Image (spheres, coloured by chain):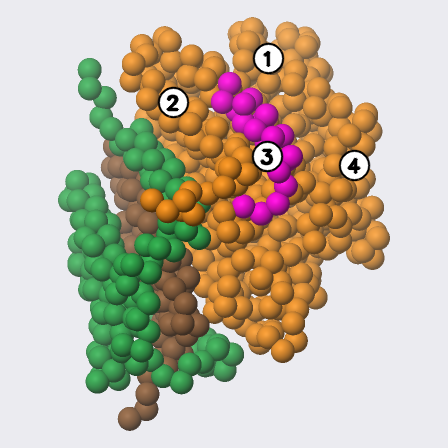
Chain colours: A brown, B orange, C green
């Protein structure tokens, strides 16, 4: 059988990047946009871990751990902002956030 | 515990400003619950004290030049310049904020901690020598700024500003990260100097195309952070919606720090493939100047107008970057310093004039300010004239050095277009001056209150900085020149 | 054994990823995202990243996703209505995406550095011992700075979302 190479992992990463980008660009629900951004960050991590395996060093994996930590911090703040928005406006749809012109 | 785990003392001294700022920020957070709302302005004092000590710390760190923490950061002239710049912007922003915050949200003092932490991030960016430090510094600075943009959480404009800033900002950061992952895959390292070494060694060099793709992905992230076209769409909305002192802060500090990492990455790591990124930066500079200046012509909200003007100024700095030379780097550094003073000064006037709930933020509201508060109006005029680029102001020499660098790099078209753009820009700045001096005082100017002490200090300091850079430019320029040469 | 494992988990990851984006109701998206996280954790194990696989499950699937679900419940956000995009756009969009995916995969395939094969167990230095060692020596400064970042996140979330207690 054809062996799995790191290129396969990178193709998977590109696929998740694309799906995430489409989600960010087409969805209106801010929560789903946030999840799409998480998908992109996961795509980054696949690349980092696959390259780490390729070079046989752990630096890529350590970088991926930092990415996860930062993603957690980002999500916390994003959801805080979203709750503040929801209190004043009762919406989580991006196109209804229109007080300032986009 | 093995002694080797503890970093050497010189390393700690090299990150002294970050240590000081983190301690000050933590102190603010610890004291915050203990103070009654009317005493919370004390926290502003602590923040300023912390920033001043950090400024001293920057000078101390500058005595111990060199890499620290396993090449994670490097203290050189470039780092010191940008560290000092972002700390000064932090001081000015806090000065503008004290009265504003007392008026709009007196119950909460975490604001100052967030400003301090944001400056920590920017200071890290200034000294970063590793992609991971660039990423962490950028995130610290950005996340703190997202929160600050939405700080008045009962104001819908603030909510919208924060959510837009966050969504577009983290989307751009994700692309930056994707680029970082690729360059790690291509070069096998995330250290900027190492990447440069790998890229410039023919037998090690990875496929140019792959490196070009990573550089392009990282460009998306950087261009977003400096609000360069085509990733500038967020800036007007976010600047308009955020509290005025926060806008002052984020249009100067994070932007300068973002340019610092942009310059460092492209002038060191990607320097061997400069022929690939130069045209991209060239195009982006061109588009940024046009979008900023022509959209600013149509604005009536003064925060939005200054937001577009800030985009246009990013365009001028991009011209200096695309010159891709030491004098280009020095010109960009000088311009960012001049821009910080004049822009923070202009936003300080907006902060002062806007009043409760930011009621008066239209250009027409300024009618007659020249008669009511001649001193404030005069200081505002200095900032506006500097933004136009009139001689004797920092803005003039900034533009002069940038276009000189562009000419030496044979970017004739860009220089001509940049000069034409500056002429267009003069129109909307002069319009503010005309409204201020030649229109009858309206309701807004009639009811204007005396300038709060903090804002007053910020105004005078910014004006002093603007004029100092305009009359004795060599003070800063010599330092910038030497630092730009040290980047190699 | 490696090939079927990779194929299964990669297929689950992509399917769940697509599901995150196409679902109308955010809670369904959240559950699908957990599916992505879980299958990626398995893939990290195949790549020799033991520690990162654990972190992926504990932090991502465990903490971040719980936060998401919590906020979806708190905001009580229902399904979103259909957006006004017309059918031709959708019909053109799908082939365009497949094309783009093909193009990018080609670029990756042609230019990315290649290893011969990824075999489970070939790379073993991704355990907690190796990662911990690096975090406290070479990556000490970013590690400490991450604590500043998390402090900001806590303070920021509290500042923005806390209800006033009078």
Disc nearer the start of the sequence (1/4): 1
Task: From the image, tell me which residue sits under label 2.
Answer: B27
Quarter occupied by the N terminus of chain A: bottom left
Q: Are marks 4 and 2 on the same chain?
A: yes
Q: Are marks 3 and 1 in contact (CB under 8 Å)?
A: no
Disc nearer the start of the sequence (1/2): 2
Disc nearer the start of the sequence (3/2): 2
Q: State the image quarter where residue B271 is shown.
A: bottom right
**Chain letter for the residue marked with disc 1 in the picture:** B
Find the magenta span and give its range.
B49-68
Task: From the image, tell me which residue sits under label 3.
Answer: B61
Under circle 4, the secondary element is helix
Q: Position of residue B294 (x, y in %)?
A: 65, 43
Q: Position of residue C132 (x, y in %)?
A: 32, 54
Disc nearer the start of the sequence (3/1): 3
Q: Main secondary structure of the magenta part?
A: helix
Front position among marks 3 and 1:
3
Q: Are marks 1 and 4 in contact (CB under 8 Å)?
A: no
Mark 1–mark 4 distance (CA, rounded to whole Å): 30 Å
Under circle 2, the secondary element is helix
Disc nearer the start of the sequence (4/2): 2
Mark 3–mark 1 distance (CA, rounded to whole Å): 31 Å
Q: Are marks 3 and 2 in contact (CB under 8 Å)?
A: no
Under circle 1, the secondary element is helix
**Chain letter for the residue marked with disc 4 in the picture:** B
Mark 3–mark 2 distance (CA, rounded to whole Å): 22 Å
Does B156 appear in magenta?
no
- How many marks the image carries: the answer is 4
How many other residues sit within 10 Å of disc 2, few (<14), some (14-19) or many (≥20)? some
Q: Nearer the viewer, residue B255 or C112?
A: C112
Task: From the image, tell me which residue sits under label 1.
Answer: B456
Front position among marks 1 and 4:
4
């Amino acid at each position: 059988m054809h062996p799995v190479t790191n290129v396969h992992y990178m193709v998977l990463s590109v696929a998740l990047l694309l799906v995430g980008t489409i989600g960010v660009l087409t969805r209106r629900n801010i929560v789903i946009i946030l999840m799409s951004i998480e998908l992109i960050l996961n795509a980054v991590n696949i690349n980092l871990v696959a390259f780490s395996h390729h070079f046989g060093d752990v630096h890529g994996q350590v970088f991926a751990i930092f990415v996860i930590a930062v993603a957690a911090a980002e999500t916390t703040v994003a959801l805080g902002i979203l709750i503040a928005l929801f209190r004043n406006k009762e919406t989580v749809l991006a196109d209804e956030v229109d007080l300032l012109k986009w | 515990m093995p002694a080797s785990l503890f970093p050497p003392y010189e390393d700690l001294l090299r990150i002294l400003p970050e240590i000081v700022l983190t301690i000050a920020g933590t102190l603010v957070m610890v004291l915050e619950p203990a103070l009654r709302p009317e005493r919370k302005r004390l926290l502003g004092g602590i923040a300023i004290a912390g920033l001043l000590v950090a400024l001293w710390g920057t000078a101390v760190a500058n005595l111990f030049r060199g890499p620290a923490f396993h090449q994670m950061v490097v203290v050189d002239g470039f780092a010191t310049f940008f560290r000092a710049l972002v700390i000064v912007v932090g001081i000015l922003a806090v000065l503008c904020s004290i009265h504003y915050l007392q008026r709009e949200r007196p119950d909460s003092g975490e604001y100052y901690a967030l400003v301090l932490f944001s400056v920590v991030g920017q200071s890290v960016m200034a000294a970063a020598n590793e992609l991971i430090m660039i990423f962490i510094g950028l995130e610290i600075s950005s996340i703190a700024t997202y929160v600050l943009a939405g700080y008045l959480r009962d104001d819908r404009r603030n909510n919208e500003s924060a959510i837009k800033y966050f969504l577009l900002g983290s989307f751009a950061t994700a692309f930056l990260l994707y680029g970082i992952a690729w360059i790690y895959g291509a070069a096998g390292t995330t250290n900027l100097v190492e990447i440069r070494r790998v890229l410039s060694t023919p037998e090690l060099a990875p496929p140019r195309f792959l490196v070009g793709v990573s550089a392009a992905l990282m460009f998306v992230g950087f261009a977003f952070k400096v609000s360069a076209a085509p990733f500038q769409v967020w800036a007007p909305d976010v600047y308009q919606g955020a509290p005025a002192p926060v806008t002052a802060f984020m249009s100067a500090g994070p932007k300068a720090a973002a340019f610092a990492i942009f310059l460092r990455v492209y002038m060191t790591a990607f320097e061997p493939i400069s022929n690939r990124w130069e045209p991209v930066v060239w195009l982006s500079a061109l588009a940024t100047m046009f979008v900023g200046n022509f959209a600013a012509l149509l604005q009536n909200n003064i925060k939005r107008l200054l937001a577009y003007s800030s985009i246009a100024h990013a365009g001028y700095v991009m011209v200096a970057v695309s010159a891709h030379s030491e004098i280009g780097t020095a010109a960009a550094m000088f311009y960012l310093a001049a821009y910080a003073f004049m822009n923070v000064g202009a936003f300080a006037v907006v902060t002062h004039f806007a009043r409760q709930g930011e009621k008066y933020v239209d250009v027409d509201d300024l009618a007659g300010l020249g008669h009511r508060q001649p001193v404030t109006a005069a200081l505002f005029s200095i900032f506006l004239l500097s933004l136009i680029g009139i001689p004797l102001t920092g803005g003039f020499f900034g533009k002069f050095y940038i276009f000189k660098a562009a000419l030496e790099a044979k970017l004739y078209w860009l220089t001509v277009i940049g000069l034409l753009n500056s002429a267009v820009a003069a129109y909307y700045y002069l319009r503010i001056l005309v409204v201020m001096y030649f229109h009858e005082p309206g309701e807004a100017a009639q009811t204007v209150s005396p300038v709060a002490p903090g804002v007053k200090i910020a105004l005078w300091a910014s004006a002093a900085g603007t004029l100092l850079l305009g009359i004795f430019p060599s003070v800063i320029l010599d330092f910038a020149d030497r630092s730009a040469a040290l980047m190699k | 054994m490696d090939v079927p494992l990779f194929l299964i988990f990669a297929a689950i990851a992509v399917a769940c990823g697509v599901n995150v984006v196409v679902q109308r109701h955010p809670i369904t998206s959240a559950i699908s995202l957990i599916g992505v996280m879980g299958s990626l954790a398995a893939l990290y194990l195949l790549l020799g990243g033991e520690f990162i696989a654990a972190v992926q499950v504990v932090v991502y699937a465990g903490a971040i996703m719980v936060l998401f679900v919590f906020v979806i419940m708190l905001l009580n956000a229902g399904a979103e209505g259909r957006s006004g995009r017309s059918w031709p756009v959708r019909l053109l969009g799908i082939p365009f995406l497949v094309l783009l995916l093909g193009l990018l995969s080609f670029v990756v395939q042609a230019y990315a550095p290649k290893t011969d094969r990824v075999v489970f167990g070939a790379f073993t230095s991704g355990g907690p011992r190796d990662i911990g060692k690096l975090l406290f020596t070479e990556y000490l400064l970013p590690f400490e700075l991450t604590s500043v970042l998390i402090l900001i996140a806590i303070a920021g979330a509290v500042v923005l979302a806390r209800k006033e207690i009078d």
